[in-house]
């Protein structure tokens, strides 16, 4: 029995809750995964998993062992990465899922530089705004906009998307140029609707100027749940739309989009990298997250207000976990 393979198989079964799913993500047969876990239990002389026809649950001993295993796997990964005399570069496959505009306009164009630095990291990139079950689908991390809703995931705040309102010249010629955000709710105007995959609801926009604050929804001809389609609809003149700076900038420069309500502001949309908290963080995932942080600093830097909020959250968490504070 290869103890490393056995521990890796056991950890994946715990995370996936299924021998079949664990086998699929490890590219092994179900029989091989089952035998590895059985051999591990025989060696340890303890039952690690309770198996039924429908589900696999970890035992109390298995839960304790799992926590030690994931730390050991992380240490082994670090040892291989930092061993003198051999390549110190992270390697292996990363499965990630990112929003389609971010992939098209930011990540993919920057990947050649990342690959030149880490040539042995291979990406399987899902491009979507859908809800991803990271454990069930064996995804290493996702990049998403908006506050994390799954509190079971570890999340790192990596950027703030600064939003503003834009419209195509063709739309403004037809509908007229609105002078106040609320004018977008008049009968002659339309917006491009964006439906969040996580809720299926249209995304509302709250705008403020000095002490004035308005919520804008508007009427739409088309509502979509994909960022690239959303941008395409705005460029086609189907309505006003709200865009982050990095998406709007090239189209404003070319004259394809015109900014509206420039004396109004919206709260930035936070961007997060989320990953399973109970899975060891490999060296390749760490360098990827660091790279995302660097990219977002260029395209969507974290605001000073967010930095202050994040610092308070870290201080609060530190106090909560400090035995002396209890």
Image (cartoon, rainbow, N blue to C red):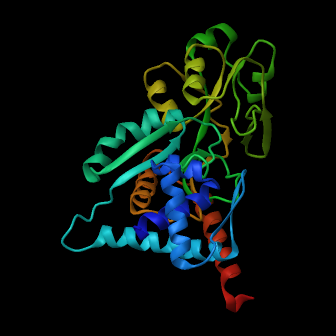
Residue displayed at 53% across by 50% down: 30
Q: Nearer the viewer, residue 282 or 32?
A: 32
Give the number of marks: 0
Pinpoint residue 287: horizontal percent, then vertical percent: 39, 58
- Would you say residue 315 is visible in this rendering? no
Pinpoint residue 229: horizontal percent, then vertical percent: 57, 23
Q: Quadrant of residue 303?
A: bottom right
| Position of residue 217 in the picture relative to residue 62 (left or right) | right
Q: Nearer the viewer, residue 85 or 308?
A: 85
Residue displayed at 70% across by 53% down: 150
**Outermost residue toward the bottom in this view:** 324
Q: Quadrant of the N terminus?
A: bottom left
**Outermost residue toward the top in this view:** 174
Pinpoint residue 203: horizontal percent, then vertical percent: 73, 34
Residue displayed at 56% across by 72% down: 41
Pinpoint residue 250: horizontal percent, then vertical percent: 44, 28
Q: Quadrant of residue 201?
A: top right
Residue displayed at 39% across by 37% down: 108
Question: On screen, 310 above or below 320?
Answer: above
Q: Quadrant of residue 181?
A: top right
| Position of residue 297 in the picture relative to residue 273 (left or right) | left
Question: On screen, 159 above or below 279?
Answer: above
């Amino acid at each position: 029995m290869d103890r490393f393979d056995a521990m890796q198989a056991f950890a994946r079964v715990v995370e996936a809750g299924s021998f079949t799913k664990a086998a699929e993500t490890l590219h092994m047969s179900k029989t091989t995964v089952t035998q590895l876990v059985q051999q591990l239990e025989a060696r340890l002389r303890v039952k690690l998993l309770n198996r039924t026809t429908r589900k696999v649950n970890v035992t109390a001993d298995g839960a304790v062992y799992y926590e030690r295993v994931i730390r050991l796997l992380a240490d082994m990964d670090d040892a291989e990465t930092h061993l003198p005399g051999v390549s110190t570069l992270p390697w292996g496959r990363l499965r990630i899922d990112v929003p389609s505009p971010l992939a098209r306009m930011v990540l993919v164009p920057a990947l050649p530089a990342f690959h030149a630095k880490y040539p042995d990291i291979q990406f399987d990139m899902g491009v979507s705004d859908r809800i991803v079950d990271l454990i069930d689908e064996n995804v290493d991390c996702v990049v998403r906009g908006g506050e994390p809703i799954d509190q079971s995931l570890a999340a790192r705040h990596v950027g703030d998307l600064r939003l503003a309102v834009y419209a195509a010249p063709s739309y403004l010629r037809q509908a007229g140029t609105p002078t106040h955000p609320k004018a977008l709710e008049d009968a002659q105007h339309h917006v491009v609707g964006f439906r969040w995959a996580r809720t299926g609801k249209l995304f509302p926009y709250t705008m403020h100027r000095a002490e004035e604050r308005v919520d804008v929804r508007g009427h739409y001809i088309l509502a979509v749940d994909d960022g690239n389609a959303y941008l395409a609809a705005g460029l086609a003149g189907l309505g006003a739309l709200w865009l982050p700076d990095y998406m709007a900038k090239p189209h404003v420069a070319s004259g394809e989009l015109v900014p509206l309500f420039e004396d109004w502001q919206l709260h930035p949309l936070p961007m997060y990298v989320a990953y399973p908290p109970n899975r060891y963080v490999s060296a390749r995932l760490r360098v990827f997250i660091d790279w995302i942080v660097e990219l977002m600093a260029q395209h969507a830097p974290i605001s000073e207000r967010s930095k202050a909020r994040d610092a308070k959250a870290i201080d609060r968490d530190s106090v909560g976990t400090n035995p002396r504070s209890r």
